[in-house]
Image (cartoon, rainbow, N blue to C red):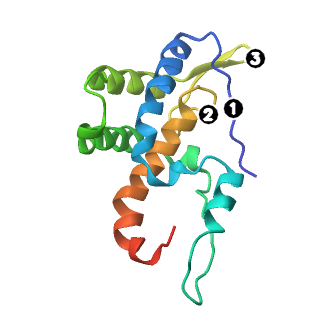
């Protein structure tokens, strides 16, 4: 059995920055095509009006252990690539350099206590920091945009 602690970062030094990153990262979500689905009800409404060819299959996909598999280097590179490749779709006031350097500080410095010991997380995405969910969505969204869609979009109807 693998265990993965979820450590709340409330009132920590990095939580202020993580909240700001979470707020600013919402400005990048429109760059991930699959994120346009709001919820299950929205998805059901949209797929009921699809005209599909005979023999089409409906499937879903989900990343396994996504937080633990996004290395710091990969996640930061994915966000940098998104910002660089979509600079024309990002507001000119978006503080790109500050955003990326702050993201690195927050993601590389998840320090927490357990009992009377201090721990520094070295691998994976810190699960208790506010920016973690959007960080993982955008990291995987980059993979979707650069690997999945270019290779399989001709076979995807939705």
- Mark 3 or mark 1: whose residue is earlier in sequence: 1
Mark 3 in CB contact with mark 2 (< 8 angstroms):
no
- What is the distance, in whole Å, between disc 2 and disc 1 at their CAs? 5 Å
Count of numbered tags: 3
Within 10 Å of the Cα at label 3, are there few (<14), some (14-19), or many (20+) other Cα atoms?
few
- What is the distance, in whole Å, between disc 3 and disc 2 at their CAs? 19 Å
Mark 2 in CB contact with mark 1 (< 8 angstroms):
yes
Q: Which residue is mark 2?
A: 127
Residue 65 position, x and y percent, is 62, 51
- Mark 3 or mark 2: whose residue is earlier in sequence: 3
Within 10 Å of the Cα at label 1, are there few (<14), some (14-19), or many (20+) other Cα atoms?
few
Residue plotted at (41% across, 55% down)? 143
Residue 150 position, x and y percent, is 34, 67
* Secondary element at image label 2: loop
Let me know if residue 71 appears in the view: no
Residue plotted at (70% across, 34% down)? 5
Q: Image quarter for residue 97? A: top left
Report the side of 102 relative to 89 (left or right): right
Q: Which residue is mark 3?
A: 115
Q: Nearer the viewer, residue 147 or 89?
A: 89
Numbered disc in front, either 3 or 2: 2
Q: State the residue lying farthest toward the front.
A: 49
- In the rendering, which numbered label is found on residue 6? 1
Within 10 Å of the Cα at label 2, are there few (<14), some (14-19), or many (20+) other Cα atoms?
many
- What is the distance, in whole Å, between disc 3 and disc 1 at their CAs? 15 Å
Residue 90 position, x and y percent, is 31, 34
Q: Nearer the viewer, residue 74 or 97?
A: 97
Report the side of 135 relative to 2 (left or right): left
Let me know if residue 38 appears in the view: yes
* Secondary element at image label 1: loop
């Amino acid at each position: 059995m693998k265990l993965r602690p979820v450590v709340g970062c409330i009132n920590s030094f990095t939580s202020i920055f993580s909240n700001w990153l979470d707020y600013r990262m919402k400005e990048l979500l429109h760059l991930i095509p699959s994120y346009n689905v709001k919820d299950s009800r929205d998805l059901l409404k949209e797929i009921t009006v699809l005209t599909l060819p005979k023999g089409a299959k409906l499937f879903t996909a989900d990343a396994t252990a996504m937080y633990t598999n996004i290395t710091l280097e990969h996640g930061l590179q994915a966000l940098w690539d998104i910002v660089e490749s979509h600079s024309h779709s990002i507001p000119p006031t978006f503080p790109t350099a500050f955003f990326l350097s702050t993201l690195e500080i927050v993601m590389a410095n998840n320090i927490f206590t357990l009992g009377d010991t201090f721990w520094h997380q070295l691998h994976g995405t810190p699960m208790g920091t506010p920016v973690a969910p959007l960080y993982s969505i955008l990291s995987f969204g980059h993979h979707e945009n650069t690997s999945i869609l270019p290779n399989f979009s001709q076979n995807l109807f939705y």
